[in-house]
Amino acid sequence: MIWVWAIFAFFLFYFFAVLQTSFFAYFNLLGQSLNFVFILFFIFVFFTKKNYFVKTLLLAFWAGFLLDVFSVVPIGVSIVLLSILGLAVKKIQIMMKEKENNYPIIQFAVMFVLAFVFYCFGIQLCYYFVGLDLLNFELSYKFILGIIYNLGIALIIFCLADIFIKPEKPKNKSRFL
């Protein structure tokens, strides 16, 4: 059953990768565009069960492969970065399992921003080592705007996913705040 799910995830990632590079490339704010594949990957990882490491690695492989194919970085860089991020998210969720989580949207937002910054820094570092001389990772207003832009879309998708995906054991009626 996991293979059917993996094939579905591949085609969903592929659809959003094509959409991201063709249609949504024209909808950018000061040069900052949406990274739909990363957003979708992070939401899938966040909503999978806490101990599904194999599913997380499959998601990282498909999403990373497609991100690498549609970019100038060598194949494998995004796979490694997303694998590290996916396993870190699962580990953090397991560590927070003992604590009651009344505010998952805040947890999602904080983890998304940290993961997105880590991913962007890893890609910029790869550009430097490949020799593209694109190491311009700085906390400029454009980079912060890119984080806010991607976070805003991710929070909208998170709220929609939270409505349609039933949690394992809801502790209260409102999962948003």
Image: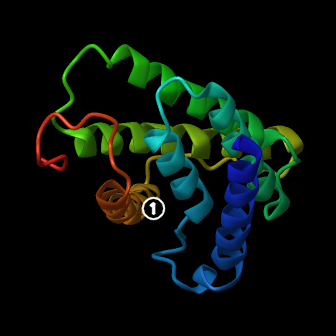
Q: Nearer the viewer, residue 122 or 47?
A: 47
The residue that disc 1 covers is: 146
For residue 7, which quarter of the picture?
bottom right
For residue 154, which quarter of the picture?
bottom left
Q: Amino acid at mark 1?
A: Gly
Residue at point 60%, 42% (across, down): 119
Looking at the rendered structure, the number of numbered marks drawn on it comes to: 1
Instruction: Provide the secondary structure element on which disc 1 rests.
Output: helix
Residue at point 76%, 40% (across, down): 79
**Visible in this render: residue 134?**
no
Q: Nearer the viewer, residue 51 or 114?
A: 51
Left or right position of 115 against 58: left
Quarter of the image where the N terminus is located:
top right
Residue at point 44%, 61% (across, down): 150
Q: Position of residue 3 (x, y in %)?
A: 76, 46
Left or right position of 94 against 170: right
- Check disc 1: other Cα within 10 Å, few if <14, some if 14-19, many if 20+: many
Q: Nearer the viewer, residue 12 or 36?
A: 12
For residue 98, which quarter of the picture?
top left
Vertical side of 132 occupied by 88: above or below: above
Residue at point 44%, 47% (across, down): 139
Q: Position of residue 73 (x, y in %)?
A: 82, 51
**Visible in this render: residue 101?**
yes
- Going by the picture, which residue comes out furthest to the front? 1
Q: Position of residue 26 (x, y in %)?
A: 59, 86
Vertical side of 65 occupied by 102: above or below: above
User: According to the image, what is the colour scheme of the structure?
Assistant: rainbow
Q: Position of residue 49 (x, y in %)?
A: 48, 33
